Amino acid sequence: MSEGMLQGMSQGMSGGMSQGVMQVVVIGYVWPEPNSSAAGQNMLALINQFLSYGHNVTFMTAAADSTHKADLDNIGVSSEAVALNCSSFNERIEKLSPNVVIFDRYMTEEQFSWRVKDACPSAIRILNTEDLHSLRQARHDAVKAHDNALRASKETAATPVVSHIASAAKEADCNTPLAQREIAAILRCDLTLVISRTEYALLTDYYHVPAKQLYYHPLNLATVTDKAPDFEKRTDIVTIGNFRHAPNWDAVLQLKQTVWPAIRKVLPQANLHIYGAYPPKKATQLHNPKTGFYVDGWAENAHDVIANAKLLIAPLRFGAGIKGKILEAMRCGTPTLTTWVGAEGIAEKMSPITPFAVSSSLKSTEATENSATQPAWGGAICDTAEDFAKHAARLYNSEESWSLASKLGLALYHDFENDNESETLAERVAIIASDVNAHRKALFLQGLLWHQTLNASKYMSQWIEAKNQNL
């Protein structure tokens, strides 16, 4: 089936588009900010993907306006503000009569999917996960429990928290109320976009989500077009990430408390530059040039920042999905020091994985050209502050080691770039569009979750709306 089939599919879809042009509505959790996060880049890429098929796209969100949002008007996308818990949305979505509705993250699906189902029952409902929020939260909870246990045991402040990262996040409980909510949202939708092979395996093998409801849709990667600066033209170490994202803020704290002091002992000439959108006061207060710790905040051009650094560092203790900063570093030929959390979803080509994390057998190693484990990580996967310091010194001081890591990272980037489904998203949507009812009939759990006795979100929203009208 060719991509052109998508444009020709109009049978069985709301709107009955005679020319095959689809009306696509994206309901965003936030405004897309491609320069603030990988999630923003991913959302904009998804919008552009449907535009490239020749379809009309409308972006809706209940989020507050943003100074860093993408210029959607410039790419031909109309945008609208919508209200939560308000029947005005039903009227608007019915008027738009979309063929496809994309919910940005499970929270948006909970708020709006029942309204879409009531107003436009034939519209294909697609959930864009970005990452599995319940997995990220479960790992965060495991790390917090670990930290609390350390404090309770009266361990000294000098104990490197990062040294326990491999064991802490892997204790995550994946059977939680939040997981139940997120998996329910996935099951209610006709198709869910999954950004990571690891999370795809978790959904199918652990949660038993039918494969026909899932589509592996990795981050849209930019083509490597220009030659990055050489070793001698680069300086310092960078990390980058939206400060509002809990894993990123935690990583900054790990850098401040344990990782950067260890690196500074072996690299007294190096500086660390921390970039990211929305730095709070508690972050800017960590700025300390005397120790080479620079909190620089917003980066106008993340690519240039990473391409001119010798190393990118990301001591992530928890998280989920794919880390856009690490892929960008590989694209720039910048060696990366991270943890198994940062490598997850990218490093599968290096070693077998569990459904929840990169295998613990994946250790930091000094790769060689003739290594039997190729393709190897372009930098190092670290477990402790000492690991970070050792590999930072090796890569920062040795042009030979740095150049090899740079080449290995770029090779892994190209491998990841070519890791796609055999059918395009256009083809998958076209298959569903050809007979939406047949697709749904085969999904027993979808029908079960839409049963009126389980529509808690719908009735809660209606209660809030009625309450607001009486104020």
Image (cartoon, rainbow, N blue to C red):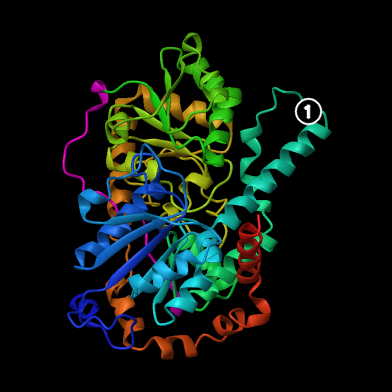
Query: Where is mark 1, residue-wise?
Result: 155
Q: Main secondary structure of the magenta part?
A: loop
Expressed as whole percent of the image width and height from the top left, the position of residue 352 reads 49, 60
Q: Is residue 59 left or right of residue 86?
A: left
Does 316 sit above or below residue 112? above
Q: Specify start and end residues of the magenta stretch as a single range.
A: 212-233
Q: Name the residue: 49% across, 61% down.
A: 198
Expressed as whole percent of the image width and height from the top left, the position of residue 426 reads 28, 73
Q: Name the residue: 68% across, 47% down.
A: 141
Of the 4 image quadrants, the one containing the C terminus is bottom right
- The one of 363 and 210 positioned closer to us in this rendering: 210
Q: Is residue 376 visible?
A: no
Amino acid marked by disc 1: Glu
Is residue 217 one of those drawn in magenta? yes
- The one of 379 and 1 positioned closer to us in this rendering: 1
Expressed as whole percent of the image width and height from the top left, the position of residue 458 reads 60, 70
- The one of 38 and 460 positioned closer to us in this rendering: 460
Of the 4 image quadrants, the one containing the N terminus is bottom left
